[in-house]
């Protein structure tokens, strides 16, 4: 199976994801975690890989903090958008752009990296375990992986709450391929298991949008975003809320000593 390329719907992707409270809240919660990870490295400038980095929103913020970021994406349109955004923000000198699938990134890197960003990509990848092995191979010992994936539990919860009982009973099979609904929603326990078997040490788990998407009154997503963000922050790193997030953000480290 081929992995999803967003060349055909790049504008829709940008508008429907980052141009909404969904995207704003996702970035807020994500950066709470990322700032904590960066603090563990001290003041040194890191080599960062944003694999499947899309339009570069997170990569650019990382470059603004002084780190050198390599962004790759399967979509040429997404890479072009990321380049333009980096130029507008004045961080092009801290960034390197590669048009390639995340699975092929190893052949484009001269050295291993300190931090890998892999956000909202695993749910589009047909061979997730092989993808995680590739990320392991390009990460330096002691480095960190920031992995955010679309949560199958959240998909189930959302569809039951809106009354899509037939869809749930049929296994929530995706009929239309060219949509923003991910091809392969991931079971969190399965993802954790893949990571641990490979040798990753999971150091953090966060539910992303553990309440936002389930609100009955959608207008409150906009009108009460500050209050909602405070509540999300309070509960998103404890169960059962982690497992109910529409996405789950995992921080995993590659041990300094292997074997």
Image (cartoon, rainbow, N blue to C red):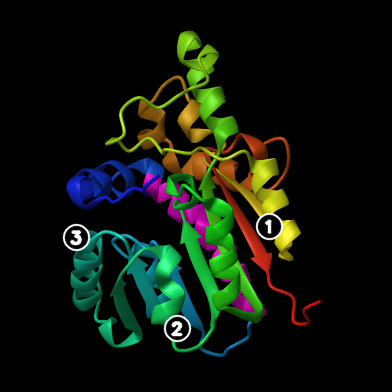
- Decide if residue 11 is in sight here: no
The image's mark for residue 6 is none
Picture coordinates of residue 29, whole percent (x, y): 52, 53
Point out the stretch of residues depicted in magenta. 23-40
Residue 203 vertical placement versus 49 (above, below): above
Residue 253 % position (x, y): 68, 70
Which residue is more in the foreground, 65 or 145? 145
Q: Which residue is mark 1?
A: 195
Residue lying at 62% horizontally and 69% vertically, measured from the top left? 36
The secondary structure that dominates the magenta segment is: helix
Residue at horizontal 54%, vertical 77%? 138
Q: Earlier in the sequence, mark 3 or mark 1?
A: 3
Q: Secondary structure at mark 3?
A: helix
User: Gap in Å between the C-alphas at discs 3 and 1?
Assistant: 31 Å
Q: CA distance from mark 2 to mark 1?
A: 26 Å
| For residue 52, side relative to residue 147 (left or right) | left
Other-residue count near label 3 (Cα within 10 Å), few / some / many at <14 / 14–19 / ≥20: many
Q: Quadrant of the N terminus?
A: top left
Q: Split into 4 quadrants, where in the image is the C terminus?
A: bottom right
Which residue is label 2 attached to? Answer: 67
Alpha carbons under labels 2 and 3: distance apart? 24 Å
Image side of residue 228 versus residue 217, left or right: right
Q: Nearer the viewer, residue 46 or 212?
A: 46
Does label 2 or label 1 sit earlier along the sequence? 2
Q: Is residue 242 left or right of residue 229?
A: right
Pick the front one: 12 or 90: 12
Of the two numbered discs 2 and 1 in the rendering, the one whose residue sits closer to the viewer: 1
């Amino acid at each position: 199976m081929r992995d999803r390329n967003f060349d055909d719907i790049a504008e829709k992707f940008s508008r429907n994801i980052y141009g909404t409270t969904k995207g704003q809240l996702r970035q807020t919660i994500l950066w709470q975690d990322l700032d904590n990870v960066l603090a563990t490295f001290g003041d040194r400038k890191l080599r960062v890989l944003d694999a499947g980095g899309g339009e570069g929103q997170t990569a650019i913020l990382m470059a603004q903090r002084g780190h050198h970021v390599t962004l790759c994406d399967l979509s040429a349109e997404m890479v072009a958008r990321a380049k333009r955004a980096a130029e507008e923000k004045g961080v092009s000198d801290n960034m390197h752009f590669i048009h390639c699938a995340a699975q092929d990134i190893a052949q484009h890197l001269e050295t291993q990296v300190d931090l890998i960003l892999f956000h909202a990509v695993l749910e589009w990848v047909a061979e997730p375990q092989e993808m995680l092995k590739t990320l392991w191979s390009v990460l330096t010992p002691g480095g960190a992986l920031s992995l955010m994936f679309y949560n199958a539990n959240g998909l189930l919860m959302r569809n039951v709450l809106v009354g899509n009982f037939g869809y749930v009973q049929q296994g929530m099979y995706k009929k239309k391929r060219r949509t923003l609904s991910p091809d392969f929603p991931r079971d969190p326990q399965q993802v954790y298991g893949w990571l641990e078997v490979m040798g990753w040490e999971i150091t953090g788990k966060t539910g992303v949008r553990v309440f936002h998407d389930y609100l009955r009154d959608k207008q409150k997503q906009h009108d009460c975003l500050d209050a909602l963000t405070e509540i999300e922050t309070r509960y998103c790193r404890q169960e059962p809320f982690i497992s109910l997030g529409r996405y789950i953000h995992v921080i995993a480290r590659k041990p300094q000593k292997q074997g």
